[in-house]
């Protein structure tokens, strides 16, 4: 075994037998230019939100593992089966060996119509079922004043599906870009989401360095 592989394995073992590991993925993090932002070819606030969640968990009893790709979804959509084998997805697959929960972070632009929500939690429609954890997390967020709607995913959410295939519970969350932009990354929505997410994790049986009753 090479020194690099040995160091990687040693690091994973330290994480595994220390704090429970929560992997945070942001598959559409890369905004190449203003046109990407204007046309929503990337999830505009997902990267800073993902970093804020990871930073907060770093100071908690959980160990965050933040993963983002380096290429745009316009080149390869990292949340689709076609991306399996890409560098980012390989990192995700490796992380699932020690991860105890996966949170897949996205964001959406302003929506037309009268309905205003802070975020969406997506239930898998294809290939797997994560309804129970989605509704449980939604309850924790609601008690903290977050209007987070539960909807069925209309497309293949392959990052979450790959976690479930490995026996790792997972949830996809979409944050409102107008709300995050108006409140700031340390505003009500992101701060209360982190608080609710931590409370949710604690009630799911994460303990020590092994999987509880998730």
Image (cartoon, rainbow, N blue to C red):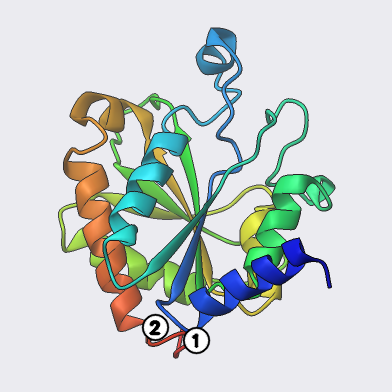
Name the residue at the front extreme.
Answer: 3
**Marks 2 and 1: CB-CB under 8 Å?**
yes
125 above or below 83? below
The numbered disc on residue 211 is: 1
Q: Residue at x 45, y 37 (%)?
A: 46
Q: Residue at x 41, y 31 (%)?
A: 45
The numbered disc on residue 206 is: 2
N-terminal of the pair, mark 2 or mark 1, is 2
31 above or below 27? above
Q: Is residue 86 left or right of residue 212?
A: right
x, y percent for residue 16: 52, 80
Helix, strand or loop for disc 2: loop
Q: Is residue 138 left or right of residue 46?
A: left
Say which of 51 and 121 sits in front: 51
Q: Residue at x 57, y 15 (%)?
A: 39
User: Could you tell me which quadrant the N terminus lies in?
Assistant: bottom right
Locate residue 97: give its quadrant: bottom right
Q: Is residue 121 left or right of residue 179?
A: right
Residue 126 appears in the figure: no
176 above or below 214? above
Residue 31 appears in the figure: yes
Q: Is residue 114 left or right of residue 67?
A: left
x, y percent for residue 85: 84, 52
The numbered disc on residue 90 is: none
Q: Distance of mark 2 from mark 1, alpha carbons?
A: 6 Å
Locate residue 194: give its quadrant: bottom left
Q: Residue at x 29, y 25 (%)?
A: 181
x, y percent for residue 148: 32, 51
The residue carrying pointer 2 sits among few (fewer than 14), some (14 to 19) or many (20 or more) residues within 10 Å by Cα, namely many
21 above or below 192? below
x, y percent for residue 54: 38, 53
Helix, strand or loop for disc 1: loop
């Amino acid at each position: 075994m090479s020194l690099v592989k040995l160091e990687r394995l040693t690091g994973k073992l330290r994480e595994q037998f220390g704090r429970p590991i929560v992997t945070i993925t942001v598959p559409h993090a890369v905004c190449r230019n203003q046109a990407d932002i204007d046309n929503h070819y990337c999830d505009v606030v997902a990267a800073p939100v993902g970093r804020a969640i990871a930073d907060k968990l770093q100071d908690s009893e959980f160990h965050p593992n933040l993963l983002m790709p380096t290429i745009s979804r316009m080149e390869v959509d990292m949340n689709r089966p076609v991306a399996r084998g890409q560098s980012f997805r390989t990192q995700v697959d490796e992380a699932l060996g020690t991860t105890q929960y996966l949170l897949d972070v996205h964001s959406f632009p302003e929506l037309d119509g009268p309905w205003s929500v802070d975020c969406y939690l997506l239930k898998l429609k294809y290939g797997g079922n994560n309804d129970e954890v989605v509704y449980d997390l939604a309850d924790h967020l609601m008690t903290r004043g977050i209007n987070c709607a539960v909807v069925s995913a209309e497309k293949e959410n392959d990052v979450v599906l790959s976690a479930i295939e490995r026996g790792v519970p997972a949830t996809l969350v979409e944050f409102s870009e107008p709300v995050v932009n108006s409140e700031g990354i340390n505003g009500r929505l992101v701060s209360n989401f982190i608080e609710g997410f931590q409370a949710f994790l604690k009630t799911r049986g994460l303990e020590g360095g092994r999987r509880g009753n998730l």
